[in-house]
Image (tube, helix red, strand yellow):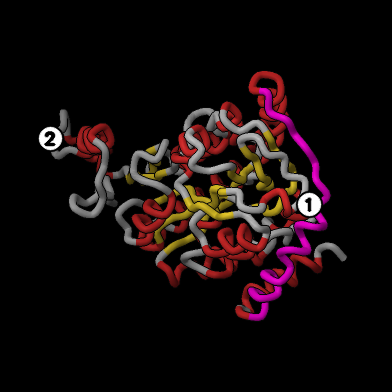
Amino acid sequence: MKKWKWARAGTIALTSSALLTLAGCGGSGSTSSEATEANAEETQTLTLAHIHNDASPVYQSLEDFADKVEEKTDGSVEVDIYAEGVLGGETKVMELVQNGVIDMAKVNGGVVESFDQQFSVFSLPYIFSSNEQFRSFMETDTIDDMYNDLSEAQLRGITYYDAGARSFYTRNTKVESPEDLQGLKIRTMTNVTSIETMEMLGASPTPLAATEVYTSLQQGVIDGAESSPIALTDANHGEVAKQFSFDEHTRIPDFLMMSDNTWQELSEEERTAIQEAGEETTETHNERWDEMIEESMQQAEEEMGVEFSYPDQEPFREKVEPLIEERRSENPDVDNVISEIEAMEE
């Protein structure tokens, strides 16, 4: 069994600290004993990249995932985590996973859409009527099928982590109707569905990396963004955005992705351990997420002066309905997934 999956020079540009870490752990220097060398050969270390800092619930969930994988495999598989975007933004690390340069990445569902159009369902507005419906759907066989279908793109879905409902927050404009979005420069993800949603609502979509949002809000490059209330505190956006409107237009989860090449190299026991670790950390993550939503709202309101409002969602729904119908007619897979979600309401 291999000891390391190296990040190949010329394909991925690591920061100096990340490169030194890899070199320090995986160097070919002499071992102190044959026993040490044999033990090292039995350990497979997987690289996992994400963009979050330690204030994020996702950060902790991925740390828990790494611990569980090591525990469940009796140390034969370790997960080496590169946080805070040290290996690049989410689109970049997804490409690195696809190409087998790194083994795993946590990315937003909007990024996955670019690799499999079925996942555009999550970027379509007002597909889920509640968080309970969303979480129930994420436990269905349909999701497992979607994970497996990613093998055509050299990827494999492991699990999801709830990232909440996305709503608008702005520097100083209260968004009570689509008319309030007219002309506002709203940071959006780079996937086509999110951009088209913003356009249909009358906003001016401005694709930016998540790491650029704070400065762009601060400098007035954008007027607002869209995410969950946790972004106000874990990314400190509440320091520069004072209005948060709960229109809850999408529920786009985070996904833990693996290179299909890596997946194929694992034993059945290792695959089972990784899937179990994913499922278990999803459960604890969702509990943690619910707690942090309440904590973030309280902190943002009391310490940052953020005002929360709750607009009528129906005018927003009406604006974007043509986009949903268009996507259903264009892609039978998308239509089938939406039909399954709708059936859950009956």
| Residue at image coords 75%, 34% | 308
Q: Nearer the viewer, residue 235 or 136?
A: 235
For disc 2, the marked residue is 29
Q: What is the total number of numbered labels drawn onto the structure image?
A: 2
Residue stretch in magenta: 305-329
Question: Which numbered dot is residue 217?
Answer: none
Q: Is residue 45 left or right of residue 210?
A: left
Q: Nearer the viewer, residue 30 or 223?
A: 223
Whichever of labels 2 and 1 marks the residue nearer the N terminus, that label is 2
Report if the CB atoms under discs 2 and 1 are less than 8 Å apart.
no
> Callout 2: helix, strand or loop?
loop
Main SS type for the magenta part? helix
Q: Nearer the viewer, residue 130 or 216?
A: 216
Residue 274 in picture, x, y percent from top left: 49, 49
* Three-letter code, disc 2: Gly
| Residue at image coords 53%, 28% | 55
Residue 30 in picture, x, y percent from top left: 12, 34
Residue 293 in picture, x, y percent from top left: 69, 34
> Callout 1: helix, strand or loop?
loop
* Three-letter code, disc 1: Ser
For disc 1, the marked residue is 130
Residue 186 in picture, x, y percent from top left: 57, 48
Q: Is residue 104 left or right of residue 166?
A: left
Q: CA distance from mark 2 to mark 1?
A: 55 Å
